[in-house]
Amino acid sequence: MQNATIVHVQRHGQVENPTGVLYGRLPGFGLSELGHRMAERMAEHWSDVELTHLRVSPLQRAQETLAPTAALRPDLEVTVDDRVIEAANEFEGLVFGRDNAALRNPRMFWHMRNPLRPSWGEAYTDIAARMRAAILDAAEAAGPGGQALVVSHQLPIWIARRAAENRSFMHDPRRRECTLCSVTSFTIRGGLVTGISYAEPVADLLPLGSSARRFRVGT
């Protein structure tokens, strides 16, 4: 049997965002102090794992999250992959405020007409396709029996997982199992996903961040 390759897809750490902007793909949103602490902890987590490939979203918060881990592996070149970027979103740049008041603006109604696609941004099917391609490329780069680390974003990771599990893309954003710096691992054999696991290596740090609950269309 062919040796399995594991692609670990990690979400970035907490972002410095005091005004509560839905930052999406906007530039200039890096990690908060807690986010950097999470990234350092993740470097410790990965220090005993024989990583053979590193890949990251082009966005600042993802690259800052990977940086401490990459520093421990100077022998590995970091591949920046646009396919693991945050999902495109029509609400990008808005501040939703208390009780998601921005969603009650009549100008927003058109963007919420079809949650199955979803109509407010990039189609789930498109996200799934690009993430699958990136994960398989990461597996190939890691080699048989190797382990790749990819740093991405919540919605793309969650859609990649649902696609691999043959589950519907329609979901409640509040119920995504993809916390900050969590790791969703895909076991690959022969170009197919044969197993999925999930872990939260910095679970003890999560309560230190904001506990405010907002409508999520991608973070």
Image (cartoon, rainbow, N blue to C red):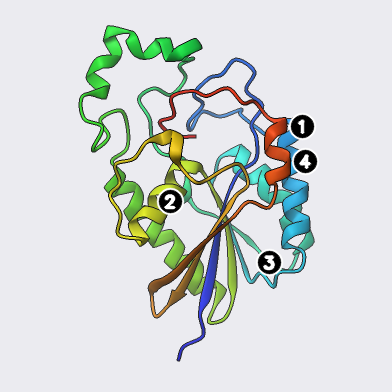
In the image, which is nearer the foreground, mark 3 or mark 4?
4
Residue 105 spot, x, y in % from top left? 32, 8
Mark 3 vs 2, N-terminal side? 3
Q: Do the numbered discs 3 and 2 sit on residues whose CB atoms are within 8 Å?
A: no
Q: Residue 135 vs residue 205: left or right? A: left
* Residue linked to disc 2: 83
Nearer to me, 118 or 88: 118
Identified by mark 1, the residue type is Glu
Q: Secondary structure at mark 2?
A: helix
Q: Earlier in the sequence, mark 4 or mark 2?
A: 4
Proximity of marks 1 and 4: CB atoms separated by less than 8 Å: yes
- Whole-angstrom CA distance, mark 2 to mark 1, is 27 Å
Question: In the rendered image of this protein, does residue 124 appear above or below residue 193?
Answer: above
The residue lying toward the viewer, choosing from 173 and 122, is 173
Q: Residues within 10 Å of mark 3 (few under 14, many from 20)?
A: some
Which label sits on residue 72? none
Q: Are marks 4 and 2 in contact (CB under 8 Å)?
A: no
Q: Which mark is residue 76?
A: 3
Residue 37 badge? 4
Crowding around mark 2 (Cα neighbors within 10 Å: few <14, some 14 to 19, many 20+) is many
Q: Is residue 181 left or right of residue 124?
A: right
Q: Which mark is residue 33?
A: 1
Q: Do labels 3 and 4 touch, CB within 8 Å?
A: no
N-term-proximal mark, 3 vs 1: 1
Question: What residue appears at the point 32 percent right and 55 percent down from the top-left corner?
Answer: 129
Residue 96 falls left or right of residue 65: left
Which residue is at 76% across, 32% downward?
33
Residue drawn at point x = 75 percent, y = 64 percent: 73
